[in-house]
Amino acid sequence: MTGPRKIFVKTFGCQMNVYDSERMTELLGADGFAETATMEEADVILLNTCHIREKAAEKVYSDLGRIRLVKDARRSAGKETIVTVAGCVAQAEGAEMLRRAPVVDLVVGPQSYHRLGDLVARARSEGRRIVETGFPEEDKFAALPRRAPVKAVTAFLTVQEGCDKFCTFCVVPYTRGAEFSRPVADVEGEARRLADHGVREVTLLGQNVNAYHGLGPDGRSWSLAQLIARLAAIGGIERIRYTTSHPRDMGEDLIAAHGDQPKLMPYLHLPFQAGADRILAAMNRKHTASDYLRLVARIRAARPDIALSTDIIVGFPGETEADFAATLEVVEHVGFAQAYSFKYSPRPGTPGATMADQVPDGVQVDRLHRLQELLDCQQAAFNSACVGEVIPVLFEREGRHRGQLVGRSPYLQPVHATADSALLGRVVEVAIAGAGPNSLSGVLSLGG
Ligand code: SAH
Ligand code: SF4
Ligand code: F3S
């Protein structure tokens, strides 16, 4: 019995990888591959990988170990399997990957995946291993087929890729290449089709999304704020978010949009990484702690209730206890609704990896622990403060309990409520009755 050929996809890393995985699945779908959640029945196994920290990259190799067994078992049963590694580890390691992991048939970087269909076909027909990690001249997005209908209430939409900032800890400028912005018309077309198929919220993605400068319909370069205004005019799109932003690129018009544009949600992920100016300089962040605090004040002046989220690294080379205290101080000062914090992980090829005074793991662990305690308190306080409020919730999916729906508050908190599934895709007022560390619960506020 032979059914349609199948593809199994596993995604690591950031939301941009989630978007890319969706597009790659869709590409192979056009070649007749159906998606499967069972690796053993997949003719193509695709890992979309992340290189940001050592742990993320190592996970790929441990997965490949398991995949080797699956591939061997399938071969014994007379079935061929094309093992594909895509994403940032693929880009960073290229041909080295073939050497380290003999199970891999195809290595394809984030800028070349629009050629995936051909590459898989070639790997099968030519029976040889292929590495495709160039930064091709053609526009990948223009070369991709039209995005297939998304059956969801919310969707990611990549509008910008790559990074020119070169923070000294970060691999992204090397794995994703130089900054590139999709033209406004291209993004608008994709957003319209999403809306036509029922998507109500789009999250605009970019490694440096607020550096967006896509070609506008007037032939000029448009800012992210202009793009947001354009997308807000699409009926059906009720909520707009964007991530991730760099403090240096928070333009005046974008800050103002948080006050003026009702569809732009009051939530902003704005990484600051470290609180000591000495460390920020060594990180090549191009901002000081007080620049960041001033920026936060301006954003809050435009939108007082905005929920702020951030990324923080502890134990960057040379970080002293006093430097770390400065990080805690910034956190105390801002009060974050949510945050992601990491131990510094030296990445091959980045300047940070060879800097003197690498911080021992024990010290990093201790600092991370202290930082996370503070961040957890702030998140709990933010969530508790919502109790008693009536908040508009966009219901996204069925909850785990019967008759329950889950949606998001404007501040991105998951909200559980008993509600009819007819309310999926609708924004509904919910009276918040309870708060947990990561979510809220409430009851529909009738007549409110
Ligand atoms: N483009 C985004 C984030 C990219 S990576 C930005 O500019 O903020 C997401 C987060 O991973 C970063 O914000 C940083 O906090 C963390 N990160 C990146 N490289 C890291 C490393 N080598 N070690 C630990 N954390 C790292
Ligand atoms: Fe990495 Fe810095 Fe670019 Fe963000 S701004 S992707 S942290 S180099
Ligand atoms: Fe990871 Fe690449 Fe995203 S390194 S965080 S998958 S841009």
Image (spheres, rainbow, N blue to C red):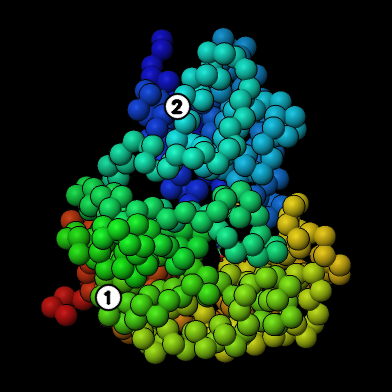
Residue occupying image coordinates x 25% and y 50%? 189
Residue displayed at 56% across by 20% down: 123
Q: In screen coordinates, is 165 left or right of 407?
A: right
- The amino acid type found where label 2 is placed reads Gly
For label 2, the crowd category at 10 Å Cα-Cα, with few meaning under 14, some 14 to 19 and many 20 or more, is some
Residue in the image at 42% along x and 84% along y: 299
Q: Is residue 186 above or below residue 436?
A: above
* Mark 2: C-beta under 8 Å from nearest atom of ligand 3: no
Q: Residue furthest front?
A: 219
Q: What is the x, y in percent for residue 288?
A: 63, 82
Q: Position of residue 400 (x, y in %)?
A: 37, 55
From this viewpoint, is residue 134 visible?
A: yes
In this view of the protein, which residue sits in the foreground, 177 or 443?
A: 177
Q: Secondary structure at mark 2?
A: helix
Locate residue 344: give its quadrant.
bottom right
Q: Looking at the picture, does residue 321 appear above or below residue 441?
A: below
Which residue lies under the disc numbered 2? Answer: 117
Residue 315 at x, y percent in the picture = 76, 71
- The picture places residue 368, in percent across and down from the top left corner, at 70, 72
Residue 310 falls in which quadrant of the image? bottom right
Q: On screen, 299 above or below 429?
A: below
